[in-house]
Every structure is written in C-alpha cells, then in structure tokens.
Image: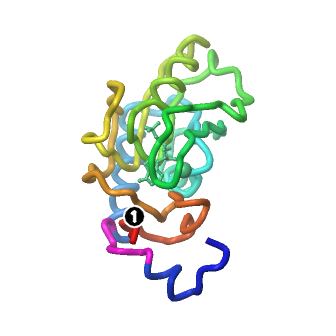
Amino acid sequence: MENLSIEAYNSKIKKVLVTKEQIDEAVKKAGAYIDSIYDGRPILLVSILKGAFVFMADLCRAVTVPCEIGFMCAKSYYEGTVSTGVVKITMDLEQDVSKYHVVIVEDIIDTGRTLKDVTKMLKMRNPLSLNVVTLLDKPERRVVEFKADMTLFTIPDYFVIGYGLDCGEHYRNLPYIAEYSNE
Ligand code: IMP
Ligand code: MG
C-alpha cells in the first residue's frame, strides 16, 4: 500500500455506493429516531473503534437527548478483504454500563461475529437497556445470527471503504461510502 502511486490509490475506489448527502440525511433520521425512543432519558453512545468513529461523530450531533460517549476497540482480524473469524476486544469501555441506556454505534455488520460478542459481553454487565445502530449491513454475509435495532443502509456483498471504513487502514477519510476494487 505504501508504494502505491496516487493514481493507483484512487483507482481502488471503484464506485460510490452511498453519497455524502445520502449519509447526512440518514444520520439525521437516525438521530431523530433515537430521540423518539429515549424521549429525554440520558443515553450512552458506545462506538466500536476504529471503523465507527466518523459515524459516531455525526450521530452524536444528530441526537438531542442528554448523551455521553464511550469507546471500545474490537478488532476483527482480516486477511486482505476476508474475515478470519477472530474477534478481540483490544480496549474496553471505561463507563459502568449498569447506569446507562446504551446504544452501540457500529460501522458495518458483516459476519455478525463482532456485534454478537460485544452485545453478549455488555449484556452481562446489566445495562438499563441496550440497542444497536449500524451504518451498514451486509446480510448476505452473515455467519452468526445478528440483527441491529436500526440499520441506515443495507448493501450487497461488496467490500466497502470510506466514512470510517478502511482497507488496510486507508480510505477512512473519504466522505462517502464506496466499493473497493480488488483488481
Ligand atoms: P463482523 O464481525 O464480520 O460482522 O465484522 C464487522 C467488522 O469488520 C466491522 O466493524 C468492520 O471493521 C469490518 N468490516 C466488515 N466488512 C467490511 C467492509 O466491507 N469494509 C471495511 N471493513 C469491513
Ligand atoms: Mg475495519
């Protein structure tokens, strides 16, 4: 990746799947939906790093209920663009979730393993309630059963980059979501 020319780097961005405008509109709706569920009750938004950091930054500004933010780092190991099935919590949340209505903020659900593990772990800590909002879902790729409470975009089985999502740690800063070219 380091030795790619800028032309080669950009040529990996195959096709825009979700534009910045579509994301902005969907995030606004998700914020309003969260407001309607919690109806003034304080929440804790928990972002799964690193992929969800951009979505978290926008979503937290789209809610108006009192809100705290927290971060957890779950690493699902990849070989290139293929999941190895190994999920590891590399940084835990600092808050005691038993005091909070928790909303997990995730970038994408692929095999379902990350969220299955993370929600199981957080439920054992007895949060007041637990909901999951995901920016993207690739239901065709599911290996373990998992359904988010709120999904902004359902996409086909493409490897995608941008708006926080990476390939080999690159492309997270794209303001839109694009299909990655493996060629
Ligand atoms: P899961 O555990 O297989 O559901 O994978 C979830 C994690 O894998 C996400 O939080 C992403 O970090 C990563 N991931 C899955 N699909 C993609 C993709 O298309 N692009 C970039 N990262 C992905
Ligand atoms: Mg990733």
Q: Amino acid at mark 1?
A: Asp
In this rendering, the answer to whether 122 lies above or below 90 is above
What x and y, as percent, mark residue 115?
47, 30
If the image is split into quadrants, where does the N terminus sit? bottom right
Q: Which of the two residues, 96 or 143, is positioned nearer the viewer here?
A: 143
What x and y, as percent, mark residue 122?
57, 20
**Which residue is drawn at the image coordinates 53% and 79% (left, top)?**
9
Counting labels gives: 1
In this rendering, the answer to whether 170 lies above or below 153 is below
**Which residue is drawn at the image coordinates 50% and 46% (left, top)?**
64
In this rendering, the answer to whether 126 lies above or below 59 is above
Local packing at callout 1 (Cα closer than 10 Å; few below 14, some 14-19, many 20+) is: some
Q: Which of the two residues, 34 or 168, is positioned nearer the viewer here?
A: 168
**Which residue is drawn at the image coordinates 25% and 41% (left, top)?**
140
Q: Which of the two residues, 62 or 142, is positioned nearer the viewer here?
A: 142
Disc 1 element: helix
* Magenta-tinted stretch: 12-18
What x and y, as percent, mark residue 80?
51, 55
- Magenta segment's dominant SS is strand
If the image is split into quadrants, where does the C terminus sit? bottom left
Is residue 158 found inside the magenta-colored segment of the image? no
In this rendering, the answer to whether 11 lies above or below 172 is below
Which residue is identified by label 1?
24
Question: In this figure, which colouring scheme has been used for the structure?
Answer: rainbow
**Which residue is drawn at the image coordinates 44% and 81% (left, top)?**
11
What x and y, as percent, mark residue 46?
58, 36
